Amino acid sequence: MATTATARRGRGGFTPWLFALPALLVYIAFLVYPAFSSLFFSFTDWDGLSPGYEVVGLDNYRAMLSDDVVVKAALNNLIWTVVTIVVPIVLGLALAVALDGKVRGKPVLRMLFYTPGVLPLVSVASIWGWLYNPDYGAVNEFLRTVGLGGLAQPWLGQDSTALAAVMVPAVWLRTGFPMLLYLAALQSIPREQYEAATVDGATRAQRFWRITMPNLRPAHYIVLALSLIDSFKVFDLIYATTYGGPGTATQVMGTWMYFNVFQYYQAGYGTAIAVVITLVAVAVSIPYVLSQTRESDR
Amino acid sequence: MTYTRRQFLGTTALAVAGAGLSACTGVSDEPSGGGSGNQGSNTLRLFTYDDASQMPKLKEQIAAFDQQNGTTTTVDNLPGSGAAVYPDKLRTQLLGGSGPDVWRIWGGQLGAPFATAKQAADLAPYYAKYGWDGRINQNAIAGMTFDGVKSGVPFFLAGVGAWYNKALFAKAKVQPPTSYAALEQLNDALVAAGVTPLGTGGKYGWHIMRLFEFLLEVSAGPELHDKLLAGAETWDRPEVVTAFTNFKKWQDRKWMPQGALGLDPADIEPGFVQGKQAYTIAGQWVENNAIGAAKKPASEFGTFELPTDHTPTRHSGFVEGYMVNARSANKDKAAALIDFLVQPATQKALGITGSTVTGAEPDQAKLPLAAQWTDINKSSPFYTIQDQAFPKQQSDQYFTVQSELLQGKASPAEAAKKMQDVVSAWAKDK
Amino acid sequence: MTPRRGGLAGTVLLSLGAVIWISPLVLLLVTSVRPLADFVANGPLTWPHEFTWGNFADAWDIGNFATTYRNSAILLALKVPVGVLLSAMLAFALSKLRIRFRRTIMFAVFLGLTIPIYITIVPVFIMLRSMGITDNLLGLVGPYLAFGIPFEVLVLQSFFRQLPDELIEAAKIDGAGEWRVFLTLVLPLSLPALVTVAILDAVATWNEFLFALIVLNSDASKTIPVGLLNFQGQFANNNTGLAAGILIAVVPILIAYVILQRWIVSGLTTGATKG
């Protein structure tokens, strides 16, 4: 860096800020500041409706400890985050590797796998609701047809399967993009690297781990970034597919926050829930963010 | 630790948020303080949740009103999701100082917050001016009266009962029952004939609840049922346990579809029209939305009041009506609009299947089944449908109890205890 | 991977997978071309007794698409270019200019990836109200921009870093200032990456529901996802209309994707070759 022309301006001077400030101001005004305002509301008993409220300190946070739904929602969030990050990435990578081979009709196949990702969520909820119908839905029909009728379940109608049943459409929606990215990255790996390895007698598995994976590192970072965004923030898919039910079995922090703020007149408590999930998300992501920051120094 | 808002704002950087808040307390200098019109102007805004297919008819009527009165009325519509989204949205609008002059709303606990927060105007003067008392069903008006204040004008009175497929009843050789025991026998006969009796769906909770509230009316009877809903009697009692036991029985004996808890009401309610289930528990809208939408003749279907074995026989019901923004600058015109909407001619033009207005009963020729409910509503009183008897939070907790019971995670006795916890916590705050 | 034999078997297997993958969408297509009465009378998972194109014309009216399409398009046209430009500027400052607190800024911006949009709804709503832009498309631009920035900056700065410093040096020796370097050198060279973030951003903007629902009131200002609510009723859903409406809503995005997918691929290719 010291050799670049810009370095001559010492610590950078004013011009870089002209580039940086517009985005930073928008970011601060519409994301950072509102997030901190929410932090404030979480210390009040505001109902979201009345003009006044009282500051109640940590009461809302204390109340969360004795709220069974919060515990359940936190656990659901955890499961959701792990599954919907890992599965689409692995599946996307597998599809990309397969598509990178000798396959005809590549653009069409790529498009088919990617298409679910552009659907509005309201449609996803309806379609999967029909597919899961216990009596005449396609999922159970399929199981009965292949002789596994014993496995037929009221997928969305019981606590034990409902969360998994909502994660399937999530994976369905979110596999396309990692596939696309990995495919792009794979196609840019110079063939000579593979040929050299083959000459050295490397097996296919060795070639994958020694050449493919390291070359995919930048793609991993981007995919992971997107997965983080989608997974922690889960709200609309669950809201539309199960409405948090049956009972509260599929509540996550996002939906539970929404119910409290907009339906139960407990904006203070609801924002406290949002604050907690945000803090957890931020804490979990710090290693990733640090790695990205460090990456920029390489 | 009590701070007033102002003290706090003096010392924090949250002044912007605070300024926003004070704008909705009514101290702002917005001339209308909500509502769309300035003082004396002729603009009105109506917020509603009509089905999209209903909108052309409504807009036509509104246009007629505008022409007669020289007003300009905009209609904003938020269909979808029933009671799940609309009240939230209405609340944000009122909070945002851009509230409508007139809005449509359900009665019970869905409409109550707007009345108790005094966001809805006291309509007593307009009741007197337009003589609504004499033209609108008194039971319905009671459903829009909160703490003695007439805060809304009801135009729709739903009576909830059974709607059935005649062919499937014939297949099982059964007739509409006249006692609860007969209803159970009917269910068994249907199951024996290979037909699922009741089409009901537990997503959102309120649809499957229509069965439970009926079972509670059967086991508790009118007087106790009302006290339970008001939190005046404990739920931890044999009558409630019986109702929960019966509820579980309906599922265990396959009187409702497998996995009913996860079904979307909008998908399952037309099941009796599709011949997938024998009947559903619903209100007069079914005749348009399920039978009419499938283009089937009404003669293939029937409806009856669920037998409770009590006198009087009551059914579940709810009202919908219009409220006027307390801060509207155009209250007179807003009331005139409502009066126009509840004219028999307008109600008929809008095709309201359960109109509260004398002279706007459903047309015997066009909606023969809904018309039966006009008679039932005259002869038999209704109890407030339970999801409107409780605030949303308590309703949701109640639905969770239902869900746990049906999944075998709570016994009927435990469910009754949990309900008592839910209701007593609410009744204490009330 | 090295070219393999058996391309046919792979093709068949993948095609089979793709067919299963896409089959839920077939349900959507079938539903969109059957009459509502047929749907209500028989249920969703049945083969239609008759077919109709009428749902599309009906859906156009019911979904108020003439208005919602225009609104969503305006929003897209405002939001996406501005968002990409602002992000690119910040990314340029972070990757190619000397700026104080560089790592702090990066850290703070990337952290935004994880902030759930719903935590900001109440304060943003209050803010918009005090600015008098609730029920206004403009009110959505700010929050949408803010939530797009972290990801866009992340992708773009990592792309910009791959551009050789020598190129920039050379331009500077020729007397070009930072702005000229940015506008005439960095941006054109990064077109594939810009297209990639733009299309992802466009999909997200096109489908965003929660903020639009809270902020927009009147039919005249609604966007497509909010307009899709018109197909639901208090007691019954117009599912055939909804299916047609969804297809109408999705088509532009799919077309854009087909046209731009070549760019996406090559854009990320460049970014990915150097690690």
Image (cartoon, rainbow, N blue to C red):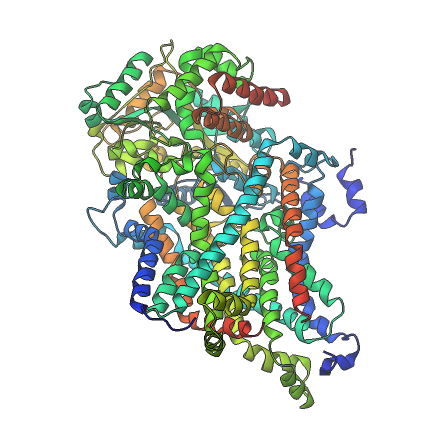
Front residue of this view, candidates C94 and C202: C94
Above or below for C195 versus B109: below
| The N terminus of chain A, quarter of image | bottom right
Question: Of all residues shown, which one is farthest toward the front?
Answer: A201
User: For this rendering, which residue is in front, C190 or C20?
Assistant: C20
Q: Above or below — where is A224 with respect to B280?
A: below
Give the percent coordinates (x, y) of residue C45.
Answer: 28, 44
Q: Is residue C224 above or below residue B204?
A: below
Which one is nearer the viewer's eye here, B394 or A250?
A: A250
Q: Residue at x 31, y 68 (%)?
A: C6
Q: Residue at x 33, y 27 (%)?
A: B256
Residue sitting nearer the eye, C4 or C61: C4
Please indicate, yes or no, whether residue A290 appears anywhere in the rendered image: yes
* Left-right relation of B222 to B177: right
Q: Where is residue B398 in the image (x, y as percent from the top left)?
A: 51, 26
Q: Residue at left 60%, top 44%? A: B97
**Residue B105 coordinates in the image, percent (x, y):** 48, 34
Q: Residue furthest top?
A: B311
Report which quarter residue B215 is drawn in.
top left
